[in-house]
Amino acid sequence: MPIFINFTKTLTLGALAFGLAAGAHAADYTAQSPANRVALVELYSSEGCSSCPPADQWLSKLGAQAKADRVVPLALHVDYWDNLGWKDRFGDRRFTARQQELAGYAKTSLVYTPEVFAGGRELRRWSSGSAFDSTIDKIVAQPSPADIAIKLSGTTPRSFDLATSFKLRQDSKDGHDAYVAVYENKLVSNVAAANLRADRFGIVAFVQNTNSGEVLQVARLAVDH
């Protein structure tokens, strides 16, 4: 379950403090984006969508197998199914808004579940292994347009400071948005508290061109043990 923080048109971010469940140790974790472009794969899903479970399973498998210098997956549950009788406990209007924003870059208002985007572009044939691999290959074959660094510093056993930095490799007249997502894996039942499991969470940071919607680069810091 990702939690999005959008730093609009900000390329250098300060520290962010948040609490973690007991069991997280005071330590430093770091991650740096590679020299090649990495594909951010976003799945828009919902518990109220009968055709979504296969897509959820596909993304879960992708997350377990994909290398962080090639693919970073995020599952984002929308909230527009909630009005049809099933409230998704992971649904969030911010994820719906992001899906609508990505659709808008393609000059359409159509959004649906399950829907997959790779690098900010809709990927209709995501379930075809060859089509998916071809799309990812084209993305990772490109040099990175930006550098992203993530640092998670332990302050106490229950508190970390998060610092992320974003730097474009070339000057650009376009606007850019920087995002940070805190995610948790293996969510299959009701969450009884807001704390994150120390063995299941991580940080994803990515930068997006606000003119084209293209996700230029993404980095993931997995704190799973």
Image (tube, rainbow, N blue to C red):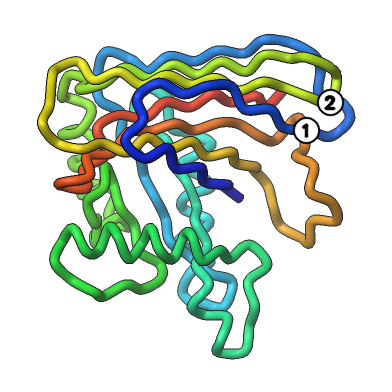
Q: At x 18% / y 71%, what residue is drawn? A: 108
Disc assigned to residue 103: none
> Type of residue at label 2?
Arg
Label 1 sits on residue: 19
Q: Nearer the viewer, residue 100 or 187?
A: 100
In the rendered view of the protein, which quadrant contains the C terminus? top right
Disc assigned to residue 158: 2
Secondary element under disc 1, as helix, strand or loop, is strand
Secondary element under disc 2, as helix, strand or loop, is loop
Q: At x 14% / y 17%, what residue is drawn? A: 170
55 sits to left or right of 115: right
Percent coordinates x, y for residue 51 in the rendering: 46, 74
Q: Quadrant of residue 104?
A: bottom left
Percent coordinates x, y for residue 129 in the rendering: 29, 48
Mark 1 residue crowding within 10 angstroms, few (<14) / some (14–19) / many (20+) = some
Percent coordinates x, y for residue 201 in the rendering: 66, 34
Mark 2 residue crowding within 10 angstroms, few (<14) / some (14–19) / many (20+) = some
In the image, farthest residue toward the bottom = 84
> Type of residue at label 1?
Gly
Percent coordinates x, y for residue 115 in the rendering: 35, 64
Residue 67 sits above or below residue 77 on the image: above
Q: At x 56% / y 15%, what residue is drawn? A: 151
125 sits to left or right of 205: left
**2 or 1: tag closer to the N-terminus:** 1
